[in-house]
Image (cartoon, rainbow, N blue to C red):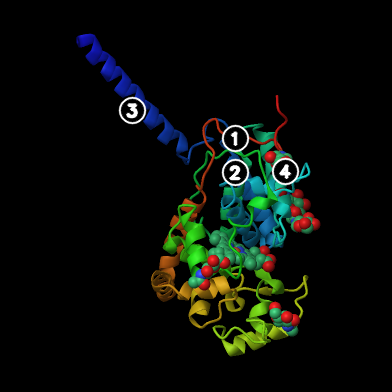
């Protein structure tokens, strides 16, 4: 009896510790590289500061790269891998919608491998680099980045569709895609606010200007005068090389101006305009538009969630030595 009881306690404790261990392994933290690479944040910061000076659009490139990474196989930098075999990698998905910033990540990775080889993941580098680049015009970090992610070994172009929302997505499919990643309607509205910086190619929205329903018509939900301005910038058919600012009145400043545009029916994509179509998302848009200062903490909170989607931690995945290729098998 007594032995049975002790055995019971032992089993229960083993299970409990097992659960605690699993939860702990899932958790990222701020001191992950304290012992192994204490200079990691400084190295990223220096390179991003330098690069941002000559390239103010870097923040837009890197945060979009992080979004596309996290929504396909989680934040494991599958998006950074080059194609090595017959099946194309994520970055070659058609359309890969002009992702860029890969060279900056390479530069950082090279510097970090020199300082502390084989300990810092590409996934953590991307999370830090995106944060630092978007924050560059500010005197402080706009959000906190916890560390401890590991890198994946698989990247498939075929997994992009169905995970990355298209520019013509309606509100129900946007909500569904975000829900599948553990993000709610509020996160959807808040993170879409990243469209306050950066540019888009005409092809992502030109159907709204010229042929919305296939009858040579414009999208009636798009402000008429704004549509006219956009038609001047994007003649039909859309040129693959022309881009327009997504938030033209405040394109380089990371702020809540995107929500002002939405409420004037000047959201660029169908997916932007769609945020007005649902009661909850509409309420979130109005709230973010009215109080400029609520945007920053809200964005920080949702970024933290996005940056933790399906992450690899503990012994899962690997620490890639070159962000473009998986490590050779031992
Ligand atoms: C809600 C669903 C979303 C859709 C449908 C969407 C779609 C798009 C499209 C079509 C472009 C233009 C790409 C091009 O033509 O070059 C774009 C650009 C951009 N997106 Fe999104 N996006 C979404 C969410 C997000 C999120 C969550 C973020 C980041 C948190 C983000 C950040 C950006 C940025 C910064 C750009 C500008 C990139 C540049 O200037 O190079 N987007 N997005
Ligand atoms: C800063 O960038 C320039 C060119 O982009 C490069 O020549 C220089 O070495 C960089 N400096 C640092 C400290 O990274
Ligand atoms: C995007 O896809 C095209 C065509 O598949 C490819 O030529 C290009 O290199 C890709 N871009 C990136 C950044 O990999
Ligand atoms: C090579 O292709 C196969 C599918 O044919 C895929 O499972 C594998 O992950 C690919 N290699 C890399 C490095 O992605
Ligand atoms: C939204 O888009 C999805 C996917 O394209 C489609 O299946 C669905 O019918 C659309 N819903 C509405 C309400 O239009
Ligand atoms: C408009 O769309 C319809 C149906 O998709 C297509 O047949 C027509 O050629 C398009 N017109 C223009 C001007 O692009």
Horizontally, residue 306 falls left or right of residue 2, namely right
Mark 2 or mark 1, earlier in chain: 2
Q: Is residue 227 above or below residue 164?
A: below
Q: Position of residue 7 (x, y in %)?
A: 28, 14
Q: State how far apart marks 2 and 1 are (Cα).
A: 8 Å
Q: Quadrant of ligand 1?
A: bottom right
Q: Is residue 26 left or right of residue 202?
A: left
In the image, residue 308 lies at what x, y percent? 50, 47
What element does badge 4 sit on? Answer: loop
Residue at 42% across / 63% down in the picture? 186
Residue 317, disc:
1
Any mark on residue 76, and which?
2
- Per the image, the residue denoted by label 4 is 324
Label 2 CA crowd tier, 10 Å (few <14, some 14–19, many 20+): many
Quadrant housing residue 4: top left
Mark 3 neighbour density, 10 Å: few (under 14) some (14–19) many (20 or more): few
Q: What element does badge 2 sit on?
A: loop
How far is mark 3 from mark 1, CA to CA?
25 Å
Mark 2 and ligand 4: say if the CB distance to the nearest ligand atom is below 8 Å: no
Residue 63, can we see it?
yes
To which quarter of the image does residue 137 belong?
A: bottom right
**Percent position (x, y) of residue 86?**
78, 44
First-in-chain label (3 vs 1): 3
Of 283 and 93, the residue lying toward us: 93
Q: Are marks 2 and 1 in contact (CB under 8 Å)?
A: yes
Q: Indicate which label's residue lies in the foreground, 1 or 4.
A: 1
Question: Which residue occupies the foreground of this view, 224 or 85?
Answer: 85
Q: For the N terminus, give its image quadrant.
A: top left
Q: Which residue is mark 3?
A: 16
Q: Secondary structure at mark 1?
A: loop
In three-dimensional space, the C-alpha distance between marks 2 and 3, rounded to whole angstroms, equals 28 Å
Marks 3 and 1 close (CB-CB < 8 Å):
no
């Amino acid at each position: 009896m007594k032995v049975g009881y002790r055995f019971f306690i032992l089993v229960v404790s083993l299970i409990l510790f097992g659960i605690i261990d699993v939860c702990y392994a899932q958790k990222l933290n701020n001191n992950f590289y304290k012992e192994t690479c204490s200079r990691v944040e400084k190295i990223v910061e220096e390179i991003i500061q330098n690069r941002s000076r000559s390239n103010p659009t870097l923040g837009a490139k890197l945060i979009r790269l992080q979004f596309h990474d996290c929504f396909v196989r989680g934040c494991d930098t599958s998006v950074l891998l080059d194609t090595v075999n017959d099946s194309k990698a994520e970055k070659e998905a058609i359309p890969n919608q002009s992702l860029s910033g890969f060279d900056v990540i390479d530069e950082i990775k090279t510097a970090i491998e020199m300082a502390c080889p084989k300990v810092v993941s590409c996934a953590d580098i991307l999370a830090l680099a995106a944060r630092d680049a978007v924050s560059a015009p500010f005197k402080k970090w706009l959000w906190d980045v916890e560390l401890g992610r590991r890198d994946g070994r698989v990247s498939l172009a075929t997994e992009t569709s169905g995970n990355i929302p298209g520019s013509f997505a309606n509100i129900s499919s946007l909500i569904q895609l975000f829900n599948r990643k553990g993000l709610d309607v509020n996160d959807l509205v808040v993170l879409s606010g990243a469209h306050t910086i950066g540019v888009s190619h005409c092809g992502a929205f030109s159907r709204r200007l010229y042929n919305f329903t296939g009858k040579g018509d414009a999208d009636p939900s798009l402000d008429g005068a704004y549509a006219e301005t956009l038609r001047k910038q994007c003649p039909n058919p859309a040129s693959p090389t022309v881009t327009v600012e997504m938030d033209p009145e405040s394109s380089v400043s990371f702020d809540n101006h995107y929500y002002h545009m939405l409420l004037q029916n000047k959201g660029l994509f169908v997916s932007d305009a769609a945020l007005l179509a649902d009661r909850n998302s509409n309420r979130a848009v109005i709230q973010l538009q009215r109080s400029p200062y609520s945007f920053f903490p809200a964005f920080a909170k949702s970024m933290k969630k996005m940056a933790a989607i399906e992450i690899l931690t503990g012994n899962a995945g690997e620490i890639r030595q070159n962000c473009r290729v998986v490590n050779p098998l031992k």
